[in-house]
Image: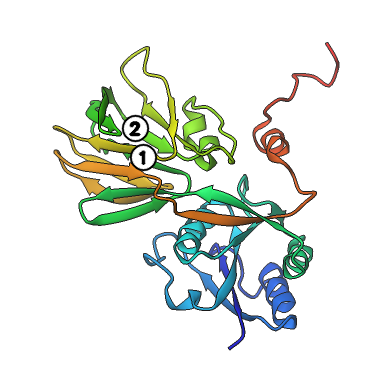
Amino acid sequence: MADAVGIVCHPRIDIGGAPVMEVRRRLEARGFRVWTYCATAEERPGALVGELNGTRLIVSIGGDGTLLWTAQQAAAARIPVLGINAGRLGFLTQVQLGEEGKALDRWAAGDFTLQRRALLEARVGDRVFLALNDVVVHKGIEINLIRIEVVADGQPAGKFDADGVIVSTPTGSTGYALSLGGPIVHPDVRAMVFMPLNPHSLFNRPIILPEQSRISIRLPSASAILTCDGQQNAALDPGAEVQIAAPGLQVDVVVFKGGPNFFELLRRKLRWGLPLTDGDD
């Protein structure tokens, strides 16, 4: 059986439309078997199983949300991901619509590199969830702040009265964590960012921990919600505990020489490092 390449696309992308058909045409012309999966976040199963057998690459067509879910599937199967941006921000997707044919030709010719992106693992009891961007424990519809106790590598790290806490990868440092004042972390740095979510304090700032750290988040008296990469995964009862670590699971993202580097992406997508005017003053 021929090697396969998968296409995962956002449901608003027409499977019979030009981008998907161009990807399929280029791949089938090179002898690849092509499978396509298209569904909303709510419709997606916990995992793609049978489709991944014999798959050499997964092409994600959509925005960052589509790539985040695709990355979770690809990481477990150790399959590289090529992101094609059909969304709004597209910070994680290097290839723009209209460039997919050229990108696939370069991939097939071996003209690419793989960039490592670590994933977080969140455990609640016997349930395990993955996140490429971030793990968030946050209050539900309650008006009041919730008390959260944090232990890092077996050492008490603090008690926070807040809306919740965020644990982010370097990849996720330009997402939700950034909007709350977190630092931007280069994707090659092996670290995770811990930060309280709207704490009732003037002095609780984000902290950067080694990637091998293990974080325990405990809820002594409040209920909360566990959200991984923007998807609500579990309701947490009072007394619940969430164990967060980076167990070495990673996704390899296809990147091309000559594409936008990290600082170019920051300027294009987030306007980081741009002056107020075009002048020198």
For badge 2, the amino acid type reads: Val
Q: Quadrant of residue 48?
A: bottom left
Q: Quadrant of residue 244?
A: top left
* Residue 10 appears in the rendering: yes
Q: Residues within 10 Å of mark 2 (few under 14, many from 20)?
A: many
Q: Quadrant of residue 8?
A: bottom right
User: Which residue is drawn at the image coordinates 49% and 78% (left, top)?
Assistant: 53
Q: Is residue 162 above or below residue 190?
A: above
Q: Position of residue 13 (x, y in %)?
A: 60, 65
Residue nearest the observer in this picture, 177 or 242: 242
* Residue picked out by circle 1: 136
Q: Is residue 251 above or below residue 106?
A: above
For badge 1, the amino acid type reads: Val
Which disc, if any, is residue 281?
none
Question: On the picture, is 30 further left or further right than 51?
Answer: right
User: Which residue is drawn at the image coordinates 54% and 65% (left, top)?
Assistant: 79
Q: Residues within 10 Å of mark 1 (few under 14, many from 20)?
A: many
Q: Position of residue 227 (x, y in %)?
A: 35, 45
* Residue 6 appears in the rendering: no
Q: Is residue 80 above or below residue 158?
A: below
Q: Position of residue 78 (x, y in %)?
A: 51, 64
Judged from the image, the secondary structure of the residue bearing numbered disc 1 is strand
Which disc, if any, is residue 165?
2
Question: On the picture, is 260 further left or further right than 194?
Answer: right
User: Which residue is drawn at the image coordinates 39% and 50% (left, top)?
Assistant: 247
